Amino acid sequence: MLVLVLSYLLIFFARVIDISLATIRMIMVVRGKRMQAALIGFMEALVFVVAFSRVLNHMDDPINVLMFASGFATGNYVGMWVEEKMALGNIIVQAITPTHYQDLTDSLREEGFGVTIVQGYGIKGINNLVNITLQRKRMGKLMRIIDNYDKEIFVTVTDARAIRGGYFSPSKRK
């Protein structure tokens, strides 16, 4: 009985690891990190073969298939969680506000963020488009600063695949 339970757990956790690695690998592919993607893909394939062969060799036991499928589902969740914690890459944040932009930009610059302001026209008149390019791991700090000035500021976030030139400082420590 213990051997059977360990076999189920092996399938489940191998699949969790396999799919978590697949999630991270895809992010590396999108970001153009070829070597990291290849190495992660190699590990992913090894783990997949272990789990898949275990299921194929014991197809008469439906719990193996359930463990395989539940490991897949859990691996998606875990992979996304790990990627979020890693916070790899850079983002571009655009905050649109009709007011508060000078105090907001001063505060952002004090914290080491590079800021560019552009004026635009929206349905209600003149708006200020505040552009900030930053490392993803600094997003929480940025959003706290923005929220301190106005929780109603319209904010969009996009991934930045490549950055060249401009002001891009490392995180400011206090």
Image (tube, rainbow, N blue to C red):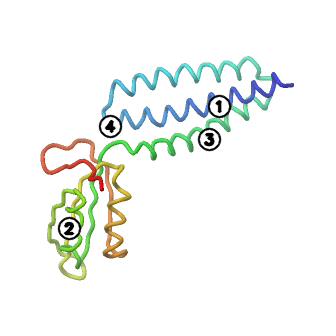
Residue that carries the numbered disc 1 in the rendered image: 13
> What is the spatial separation of the Cα atoms under label 4 and label 3, in whole angstroms?
24 Å
Question: CA–CA distance between discs 3 and 2?
Answer: 41 Å
Lower position in the chain sequence, tag 1 or tag 2: 1
Q: In terms of image quadrants, where is residue 86? A: top left
**What's the amino acid at mark 1?**
Phe
Identify the residue at image location x=27%, y=54%: 92
Name the spot of residue 173 as percent of width and height, x first: 29, 53
Q: Which residue is mark 4?
A: 31
Tell me which numbered mark, 4 or 3, is placed earlier along the sequence.
Answer: 4
Q: Secondary structure at mark 3?
A: helix
**Which residue is tagged 2?**
105
| Apparent side of residue 55 relative to residue 20 in the rendered image (left or right) | right
Q: Is residue 128 above or below residue 109?
A: below
| Residue type, numbered disc 2 | Thr
* Crowd tier of the residue under label 1, counting other residues whose Cα lies within 10 Å: few below 14, some 14–19, many 20 or above: many
Do the residues bearing badges 4 and 3 touch, measured as CB atoms within 8 Å? no
Q: Are marks 2 and 4 in contact (CB under 8 Å)?
A: no
Q: Residues within 10 Å of mark 2 (few under 14, many from 20)?
A: many
| Picture coordinates of residue 2, whole percent (x, y) | 83, 25
Q: Viewer-nearest of labels 2 and 4? A: 2
Which mark is first along the chain, 1 or 4?
A: 1
- Local packing at callout 3 (Cα closer than 10 Å; few below 14, some 14-19, many 20+) is some
Sequence-earlier tag: 1 or 3: 1
Q: Which mark is residue 74?
A: 3
4 vs 10, left or right, is: right
Q: Secondary structure at mark 2?
A: helix
- Whether label 1 touches label 2, CB < 8 Å: no
Q: Residue 116's x, y, as percent?
A: 16, 61
